[in-house]
């Protein structure tokens, strides 16, 4: 079982002084890492606990206002990032599930990779959550009663597609230069 000890740090010239008030211990090191390691060893010897079971809370009261403003900015950034994630997830679900925008297009609109969209989009085959289509799909065309090629009683409707051949570059459609 680990126990936590507060270590108060202060800068003294080129050294970091480390005090463990609850045990009345003091040490110092050139770097924070060195001061922390020395304080951990002191606490371990004083309490008989193994060094890896000691948890140190490093506190630098003279730097609290400076470090506090950084901690506050990081907290606000984390909250904003969480709010952004919630908004993006809601937008992906609405675009893909409700508005039937493709996952690729949703990603393009939101600046997300296909992998990010697929993680946030509703799972494929979640038909229960999807509304039924407005009209039934058209019936397939029927064959002639005699089984021959062509259409049965209902001819195809709509414009016929016409195709045109492009002449090679520098030539007219009739083949002349």
Image (cartoon, rainbow, N blue to C red):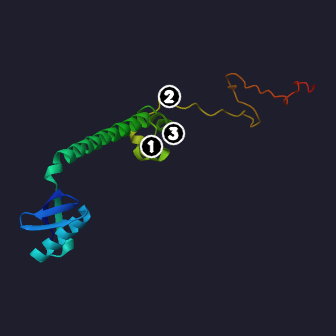
What residue did someone put label 1 on?
Answer: 117
Residue marked by disc 2:
135
Q: Secondary structure under badge 2?
A: loop
Which residue occupies the foreground of this view, 56 or 164?
56
Q: Mark 3 points at which residue?
A: 104
Relative image position of residue 110 (x, y in whole percent): 44, 36
10 Å crowding of disc 3: few (<14), some (14-19), many (20+): some
Measuring from the top left, give residue 118's x and y in whole percent: 45, 46
Which quarter shows the C terminus? top right
The first of marks 2 and 3 along the sequence is 3
Residue sitting at 21 percent across and 45 percent down?
Answer: 66
Q: Which residue is located at x 37 percent, y 40 percent? A: 89
Q: How crowded is mark 2: few (under 14 residues within 10 Å), some or many (20 or more)?
A: few
Q: Quadrant of the N terminus?
A: bottom left
- For the point 41% across and 38% down, the residue is 92
Q: Earlier in the sequence, mark 2 or mark 1?
A: 1
- Residue 146 in percent (x, y) is at 75, 35
| In the depicted structure, whether residue 140 falls above or below residue 11 | above
Q: How crowded is mark 1: few (under 14 residues within 10 Å), some or many (20 or more)?
A: many
How many numbered badges does the structure rendering display?
3
* Most distant residue in the right direction: 176
Question: Can you see residue 33?
Answer: yes
Q: Tell me the residue at 20%/58% (across/down).
A: 13
Tell me the distance, in whole angstroms, between the alpha carbons under discs 3 and 1: 8 Å
Q: Of tags 2 and 3, which is closer to the observer?
A: 3
Question: Is 158 located above or below residue 37 in the figure?
Answer: above
Could you tell me if the residues under marks 3 and 1 are in contact, i.e. CB atoms within 8 Å?
yes
Q: Distance between the residues labelled 2 and 3?
A: 26 Å
73 to the left or right of 84 = left
Residue 130 visible in the picture: no
Residue 26, located in which quarter of the rendered image?
bottom left
Between circles 2 and 1, the one closer to the viewer is 1
């Amino acid at each position: 079982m680990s126990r936590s000890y507060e270590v108060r740090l202060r800068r003294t010239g080129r050294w970091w002084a480390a005090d463990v008030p609850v045990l009345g211990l003091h040490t110092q090191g050139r770097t924070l890492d060195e001061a922390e390691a020395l304080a951990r060893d002191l606490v371990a010897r004083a309490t008989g606990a193994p060094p890896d079971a000691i948890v140190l809370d490093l506190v630098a009261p003279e730097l609290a206002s400076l470090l506090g403003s950084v901690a506050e900015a990081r907290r606000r950034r984390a909250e904003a990032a969480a709010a952004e994630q919630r908004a993006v997830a809601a937008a992906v679900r609405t675009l893909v599930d409700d508005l039937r925008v493709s996952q690729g297009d949703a990603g393009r609109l939101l600046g997300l990779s296909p992998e990010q969209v697929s993680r946030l989009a509703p799972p494929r085959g979640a038909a229960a959550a999807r509304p039924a289509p407005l009209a039934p799909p058209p019936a397939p065309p029927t064959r002639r009663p005699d089984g021959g090629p062509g259409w049965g009683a209902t001819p195809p409707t709509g414009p016929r597609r016409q195709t045109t051949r492009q002449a090679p570059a520098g030539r007219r459609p009739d083949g002349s230069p």
